[in-house]
Structures are given as C-alpha cells and as structure tokens.
C-alpha cells in the first residue's frame, strides 16, 4: 500500500472518530456514533497492517496481542457493574498510558522502524517529542492506578496530604526537563529511563493528594492526559491519525474536567495541580440541638400519591445502596396514580461525569424523564414534593446564601423551593463537605431515616396497598 | 533536413529527461517509503510544524464537538474516548511488525495487548451503556 493511500485512510479513520463523538449529542444517534468509532479503529489497524513491510512470524505477535487483549477487554466490559464504571475507566486510562510508554521505548531502541533515525542517532525533534510522549504516558499510568485504587476502595478515598508536596512536584518537573536536555545532548539511555521514572513518581504524587468529592475531576483529567499521551506519541511517529485522535480525547477530557469543576465551584487549576482536594471545613457542630421531623414510608407514600408533581433528586448514596430499581418501581406506581415524576441530576452527582444518568438508564428510567440541573432548577418552586435520595451537599441552600460556607457559590438544586421535601438518609450525619444542611430542619421537610433501598421498597409496599 | 533531425533528437532528449525525472520521482518515493517520512531535511514544511497544525485544528474540532455532547451521555463519552485514545495501538503495530529487534518485538506486543484491552473493552462498555438509554414508552 502506498504511503499516500495509507494517509488518506488514516484521514477516514479520523473522521470516523469525530463522528463517533458527534453521535453522542443525542441518545438516538449515539449507538450509530459508537459504531463509527469501531469502524475508525478497524480502518486504522487494518491500514497499519497493510502498510507493514514484512508479513512473517511477527504477524503472529500482532495477532496474539490482539486476541489476548481483546478477550480480556471483552470479558471485563461484559462483566463490569455499572456502579463500578469510574474505576473501570480509571483502569483503562492507565493502560493507554502504559501502552504509550512501551511505544516510546520501542521507538528509542528501534528508531529506524519509525523512520526517525538510527539507534544512537535519533533526530533532535524526535527525541524531544518522544520524551514528552513517554512522560505524559507514565504520568497517566501511575496517576490512573492511584485513581483506580482510591475508587475501588483499595486505598483511602480521602485526600492524603504530605509536606512540601508542591515543591517536590516542582522539583521533579524541573529534574525531568533537565533529563530531557541530557537525553537530547547525549542520547543516553540512562536519561531516557530517568525521565520515565520521574514521570511515574510525578503521576503518583500528583493524584495522591486529590480525593473525596474531587474524584470526578481526577477521572476527567486523566481521560484528557491519556489523549495527550497518544498525541505526543503521534508526534514521534509523525502520524496525523494519532495526533488527531489524541487531541480529540485530550480536549474532551479537558472540557469534562472544566464542567466538573464548575459543578463544584472549584478552580480548574487548584484541582489540576492537585493537593487542594481536602478542604473539609468543620462547620457542622451545632447540629445536635436542632429539631427535625421524621417521617415514615407510609407518610411519604401518602404525600406523594396526593401530589401533582414529584421531582426525584438522586445522588451517589442511591447507587451505593443499589436503590435505583426500587426507586424506579416507586416512580412507576406514582405515575399510575397520575402523578408527574421526573428526575433532577446535578452535574457532579456520582463519581464520574454522567454516572447517575447511566445508573438510572440501567434501572429502565426513560432518558426523557431525566433532566439536568439547568433544565429543571426553575421547576422546583411549582413542585409538590422533592424526593432527595442519597444526595446532600448538592441540595444545600447555604451554597446560595452563606458567604462563609466552604461550598458557597457552588451551583445547587433548588430543593428548598419545593412545597414539601422528603429526604432519604441513613442517619443525621453531614455530607461529603462536612457541612450541615438547613433543609433537614425545615417545617416542610420529612426525614426518612433508613437505607435508601429499604425505604424505596417500603414506600412501594405502602403505595401498593 | 538538419533541422528535422535536430528536432527529433531534441524530442528524444526530452523523452529521456522525462524518463529520468520519473525514475527520480520513483527513487524519491522509495526513499520516502523506506524512511517512512524523511524528516526535517526534505523539501517543504517540517513534520513538526505539520503535526502542530493538525493538533491545533483537531483541538478546535474536539472542543466544538464535545460541547455539543448532551450531559446525560458524559459517561459513554468517556468510554468512547477511552477506546479512541487506544489508537496508540498503531505505534505498537509498527514496532512489532518492523522486525529485527527483540526489544521492539516485546514492546510492540505489550503495547498491542494493552491497547486491545482498551479498544474492545472501551467500545463494548460504551455500547452496553448506550443500549440502556431508552425513550419513554407511550
């Protein structure tokens, strides 16, 4: 196959990737979009195979890799629980990062395969591009491993703070740049491996201090990094397909991180630099002497059955309790009684962008009953009941009023404007941010203190009577 | 008479020059093939600049396309971008198929395996997510 034809086919693959992302603008077109993505990947792999100079035993290596990797990937994708999506995505990111490191190592020891020089005589700009690619890949690898461990619960999800973290990271960054200079001047393999090691350390140290509510940002950020790693390798290989695909993924991850940051009113850079994730302001001290109304499943069933409109506000707690199916059953029964039931999703509900939507979709909730915060926030005032389940901080009205609060300025769902509030909660503790929620003590609020799943099932029973 | 022979000779010469230049072009193409893309020395813009051009344009395309993605599908977006970034498999394929270097073979194999996990896993899990999104039954 001629190089020009290959380049054109790579262009077709790039267009397929763009169409794959474009398809996601609506659920109707999204499945077709995903098939475009698969087609693009098939074209990319097929073209590269057709371009290869030799067709001998090495083809077996390729096939073995695809079969082994493909089977593992298929097995994992079929078996994974939807609640475990965030850690799965983090694990997948780490693989992209490590693959980038391997490709860079291959390019360093066998540069003629990529047409970038001979061993010991690699062109200068290729060396720089290679260092950038390998460094981003290594950071993505260890960073994603840490993120995976935190999400999976292998490691404490809390931010771990250590002294001088920014200075250590800065020193490591500067050392890495010095190693790049050394590599470019001497092409020493020691310099190359030191860059890898430093980047591995940097990835670990950058993600360790981030945790808690910042995890959605971390995942999006690593998504972005994995894209830039591919783009960096694309420069080394002088392959436009890799550059295009990498940039698409890189900008996608960056936009998602931005949306997540905005959803928490946190600055992009404070999260991206790491280390600021642990602002756990202790401001819930006076919770003990306030009175609240406790309600039962029967009360809740009666109240909702006699309403015109109910907005359900699900949070990660619902997913932890696996309450989504029982919740959907409850909503179905209410709809049979003529009640309008819709769902309101906060941008940072769940552990990754859009996680709550997937969990509701899995429980057979139709997507046209699920609304984003901006679409629905005005409707709370004309709603009879807001049913909050497993969410807390994203409904806290102090974010709108109390300038001294650590969540001040964070966009919240206007649950406080609803006529009645039902709050499903395991106990009267405070949320992630450690802030007391004044909603609990309002006259119009009933606290339904129970496990989310059990409470939904009890309400279903009461509704069926 | 002499003019006619001169003209034919000139014609022959021109043909030969044409053949030679075609041969040269072939040679150049072969050279480009063997070195994949000859690097900064060849005529025209350096690959680095071309790469940067592509990068910047692709970032703009990505920016606009991703903002049009509905927030409800942000998880599938991560799944599919995950699979797409595994296009890095191309680098592994080149390494494994080049032959002649054990390091290159091993690294290529590892990169292909890891990227394949991601490609198959990423697209499939995205498909699983997307097939759950259903419209209201009316």
Image (cartoon, rainbow, N blue to C red):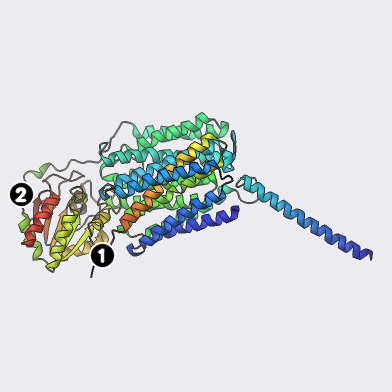
Q: Is residue A453 visible?
A: yes
Name the residue located 46 percent from the left edge and 56 percent from the top edge: A40
Q: Which residue in the rendered view is the most extreme toward the top?
A: A190
Q: Nearer the viewer, residue A70 or A119?
A: A70
Q: Is residue A80 left or right of residue A14?
A: left
In the image, is residue A156 above or below residue A375? above
| Image coords of residue A247 (percent x, y) | 45, 51
| Image coords of residue B65 (percent x, y) | 41, 59
- Give the label, 1 or 2, closer to the camera: 1
Circles 1 and 2, Cβ within 8 Å, touching? The answer is no
Q: Secondary structure at mark 2?
A: loop
Q: Is residue B82 visible?
A: no
Numbered-mark total: 2
What's the chain of the residue with tag 1? A
In the drawing, what numbered circle is on residue A368?
A: 1
In the drawing, what numbered circle is on residue A291?
A: 2
Image quadrant in which you'd find residue B15 = bottom right
- The image quadrant where one finds the N terminus of chain B is bottom right
- The image quadrant where one finds the C terminus of chain B is bottom left
In the image, is residue B76 above or below residue A104? below
Q: What separation in Å lies between label 1 and label 2 (alpha carbons)?
A: 38 Å
Q: Is residue B128 left or right of residue A240?
A: left
Q: Nearer the viewer, residue A248 or B28?
A: B28
């Amino acid at each position: 196959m001629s190089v020009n034809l290959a380049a054109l086919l790579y262009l077709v693959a790039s267009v397929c990737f763009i169409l794959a992302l474009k398809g996601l603008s609506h659920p109707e077109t999204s499945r077709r979009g995903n098939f475009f993505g698969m087609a693009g990947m098939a074209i990319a792999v097929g073209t590269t195979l057709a371009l290869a100079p030799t067709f001998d035993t090495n083809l077996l290596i390729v096939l073995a890799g695809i079969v082994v990797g493909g089977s593992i990937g298929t097995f994992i994708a079929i078996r994974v629980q939807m609640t475990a999506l965030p850690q799965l995505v983090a694990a997948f990111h780490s693989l992209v990062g490590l693959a980038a490191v391997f490709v860079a190592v291959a390019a360093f020891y066998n540069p003629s395969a990529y047409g970038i020089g001979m061993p010991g005589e690699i062109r200068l700009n290729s060396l720089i591009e290679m260092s950038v690619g390998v460094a981003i890949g290594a950071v993505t690898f260890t960073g994603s491993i840490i993120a995976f461990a935190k999400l999976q619960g292998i490691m404490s999800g809390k931010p771990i703070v250590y002294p001088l973290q920014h200075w250590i990271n800065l020193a490591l960054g500067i050392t890495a740049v010095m190693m790049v200079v050394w590599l470019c001047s001497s092409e020493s393999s020691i310099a190359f491996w030191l860059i890898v090691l430093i980047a591995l350390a940097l990835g670990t140290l950058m993600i360790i201090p981030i945790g808690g509510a910042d995890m959605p940002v971390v995942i999006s950020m690593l998504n972005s990094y994995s894209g830039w790693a591919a783009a960096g390798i694309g420069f080394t290989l002088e392959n436009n397909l890799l550059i295009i695909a990498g940039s698409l993924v890189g900008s996608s991850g960056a936009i998602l991180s931005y949306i997540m940051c905005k959803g928490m009113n946190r600055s992009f850079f404070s999260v991206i630099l790491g280390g600021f994730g642990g602002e756990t302001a202790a401001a819930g001290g006076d919770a003990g002497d306030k009175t609240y109304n406790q309600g039962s499943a029967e009360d809740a069933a009666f109240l909702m059955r006699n309403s015109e409109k109910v907005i359900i506000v699900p949070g990660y707690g619902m997913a932890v309790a696996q309450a989504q199916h029982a919740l959907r059953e409850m909503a179905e029964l209410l709809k049979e009684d003529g009640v309008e039931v819709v769902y309101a999703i906060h941008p940072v509900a769940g552990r990754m962008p859009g996680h709550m939507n997937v969990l509701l979709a899995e429980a057979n909730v139709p997507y046209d009953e699920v609304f984003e915060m901006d679409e629905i926030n005005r409707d709370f005032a004309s709603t009879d009941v807001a049913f909050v389940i497993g969410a807390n901080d994203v409904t806290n009205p102090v974010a709108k009023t109390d300038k001294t609060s650590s969540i001040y300025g964070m966009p919240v769902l206007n649950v406080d404007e609803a006529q009645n509030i039902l709050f499903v909660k395991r106990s009267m503790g405070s949320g992630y941010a450690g802030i007391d929620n004044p909603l609990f003590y309002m006259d119009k609020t009933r606290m339904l203190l129970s496990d989310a799943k059990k409470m939904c099932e009890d309400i279903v029973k009461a509704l069926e009577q | 008479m002499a003019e006619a022979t001169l003209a034919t000779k000139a014609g022959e010469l021109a043909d030969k020059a044409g053949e030679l230049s075609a041969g040269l072009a072939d040679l150049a193409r072969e050279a480009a093939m063997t070195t994949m893309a000859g690097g900064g020395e060849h005529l025209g813009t350096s690959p680095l600049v071309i790469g940067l051009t592509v990068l910047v344009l692709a970032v703009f395309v990505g920016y606009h396309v991703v903002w049009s993605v509905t927030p409800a599908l942000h998880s599938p977006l991560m799944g599919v971008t995950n699979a797409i970034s595994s296009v890095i498999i191309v680098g592994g394929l080149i390494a494994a198929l080049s032959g002649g270097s054990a390091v290159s073979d091993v690294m290529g194999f590892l990169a292909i395996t890891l990227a394949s996990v991601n490609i198959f896993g990423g697209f499939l899990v995205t498909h699983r997510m997307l097939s759950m999104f259903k419209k209201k039954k009316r």
